[in-house]
Amino acid sequence: MGVADLADYPWDAVAPYAARAGAHPDGIVDLSIGSPVDPTPPLIARALAAATDAHAYPQTVGTPALREAIVDWYARRRGVPGLTPDHVLPSIGSKELVALLPLLMDLGPGDTVVHPRAAYPTYEVGARLVGATPLASDEPADWPEGTRLVWLNSPGNPDGRVLDAAFLRTAVARARELGAVLASDECYAELGWEAPWDRDPIPSVLDLRVTGGDATGILSVYSLSKQSNLAGYRAAFLAGDPALVARLVTARKHLGLMLPAPVQSAMIAALGDDEHVEAQKERYRARRATLKPALEAAGFRVDHSEAGLYLWATEGRDAWESVGRLADLGILSGPGHFYGAHFPQHVRLSLTATDERIAAAAARLGGA
């Protein structure tokens, strides 16, 4: 199949509910798409501005300084020592990497791409784009022969579920039995809320407890969109098996997939500073502490959501009915139908709204 054969973009179906929510006298509280609303930290913006004399083509592989910054960040923040610049590669945001990885790996008809049951839809889109078969499964024992790529997502979008090191070990072992690449989307890993993840780092698939120091067949994917408010910069990267990285570098060179040079400089600044990440995490922690109890008091049950940027909630009826109920309160959410066929009664609510809008949503839920 080709791009023209993909289904209509699902978020277009939310437009009527956005109109309903927008009719609220106090305006809409848009919790549907997790697009950051807080300012880009000044030190990052300054680094971008200082690099605007970008007259030469950037390197697909990234500058040596950026690759070293990624290596240092994995060791410092993700508990993954021992990487080298050959283990890492920047990408133009993480969504293009997720969508294009099956293509860059030369997958096609007859190949299976596994993704979570509650899943960001781009995993499936990437499989269908090359004619591979997507399979929603959270159980490694159920992954079939013919699986060539396995996507994990921890913390999950939409459900905020964290995969511990024991599960990751099992998943890596099964992927290796099948001869599959295992790619773990970890872009919310700095946002842990509930025990033990409120105090313990959320493990990467490259954690030594998972790999024993052998990254063969493994990729970790990360984005700075949420923790550094860089969604508009399209700043992301991967790390893992250097042989896989080399293959991806070659393919991306042919396709012209190069991260702009000023963005690379901004990423170096972002990766080297932990203070702004902690400050942003505290903003999201406060918003979650306001919104979650208000949802529960209004009759919703929040499932998982122990980490990440969303609340995954249900009131025990079809998600579109819940989306409608919330829209009548001026709150826009995302239906579980968008995240696979297995959660038709859940809605996803993002923490990416201002403090004032989150407080407004909580007040409206309380009034309901």
Image: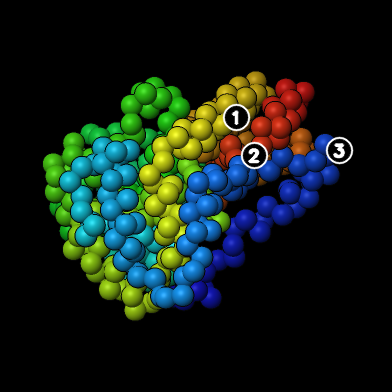
Secondary structure at badge 3 equals loop
Whole-percent x, y for residue 85 in the image? 24, 57
Of labels 1 and 3, earlier in sequence is 3
Which mark is drawn over residue 287?
A: 1
How far is the residue under mark 1 from the one under mark 3? 22 Å
Question: In percent of the image, x 14 and y 44: which residue is there?
Answer: 213
Judging depth in this view, the residue of 192 and 47 nearest the camera is: 47
Question: In percent of the image, x 61 and y 42: which residue is there?
Answer: 38
Secondary structure at badge 2 equals loop
Name the kind of residue labelled 2 in the image: Ala
Name the kind of residue labelled 3 in the image: Pro
Judge left or right: residue 28 versus residue 81: right
Judge left or right: residue 366 versus residue 291: right
Which mark is drawn over residue 353?
A: 2
Q: Quadrant of residue 36?
A: top right
Judging depth in this view, the residue of 235 and 341 nearest the camera is: 235
